[in-house]
Image (spheres, rainbow, N blue to C red):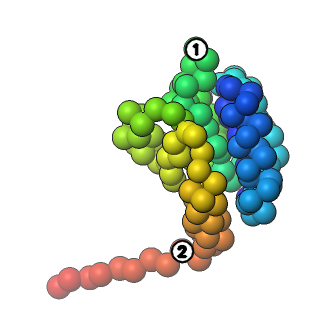
Amino acid sequence: MKTIIIEDELNNLNLLTHFLKKYCPEIDLIASCQTKDEGVALINQHRPDLLFLDIVLEENNAFELLEEIEHKEVKVVFVTAFDQYALKAFRYHAVDYLLKPIQIDELIEIVKRVNKQHKNEGFLIIFILIVT
């Protein structure tokens, strides 16, 4: 899955990058950045399948970023130290919400689940129930 990380704290960005490369071979990490504006540009340019997105991005936030992107089909895993944003995150169709400090087993499970969804997207089955 083509993936972008957007995280304003360099240590957290480097740690998540390391974890994804070491434990999640399904991930094709195509880019990372530290600001909302860079993130918007990268998402619109690369059209990733998945974002790992910090909620607080210096003076901006992830929700502002999501409002500005053109590529709306991207799946989002919010990565944050703040649990109070969880409800709002799911209003933006988050596929998951990962609290810092990152637990490797949780990260691996999230990536496996998102990868499974990604692979199955081509197999949409519609059931229609007609009641007469």
- The one nearer the camera, 122 or 57, is 57
Which image quarter holds the C terminus? Answer: bottom left
Residue at 66% in and 50% down = 50
Q: Secondary structure at mark 2?
A: loop
Q: Write down the quadrant of residue 86 in the picture.
A: top left
Up/down of 14 relative to 90, above or below: above
Tags 1 and 2 touching, CB below 8 Å: no
Residue at the outermost bottom position: 132
Is residue 73 shown to the viewer in this render? no
Up/down of 75 relative to 99, above or below: below
Q: Nearer the viewer, mark 1 or mark 2?
A: 1
Name the kind of residue labelled 2 in the image.
Leu
Numbered label attached to residue 95:
none
Name the kind of residue labelled 1 in the image.
Glu
Up/down of 34 relative to 86, above or below: above
Residue at 74% in and 27% down = 10
Residue at 36% in and 40% down = 87
Residue at the outermost top position: 59
- The one nearer the camera, 124 or 23, is 23
Residue highlighted by disc 2: 124
Determine whether, in the image, residue 69 is placed left or right of residue 10.
left
Residue at 35% in and 79% down = 128
Residue 9 lies, in percent from the top left, at 68, 26
Determine whether, in the image, residue 90 is placed left or right of residue 113.
left
> Within 10 angstroms of label 2, few (less than 14), some, or many (20 or more) residues?
few
Mark 1–mark 2 distance (CA, rounded to whole Å):
40 Å
- The one nearer the camera, 6 or 121, is 6
Residue 105 lies, in percent from the top left, at 60, 59
Residue 30 lies, in percent from the top left, at 82, 46
Residue at the outermost left position: 132
Residue highlighted by disc 1: 59
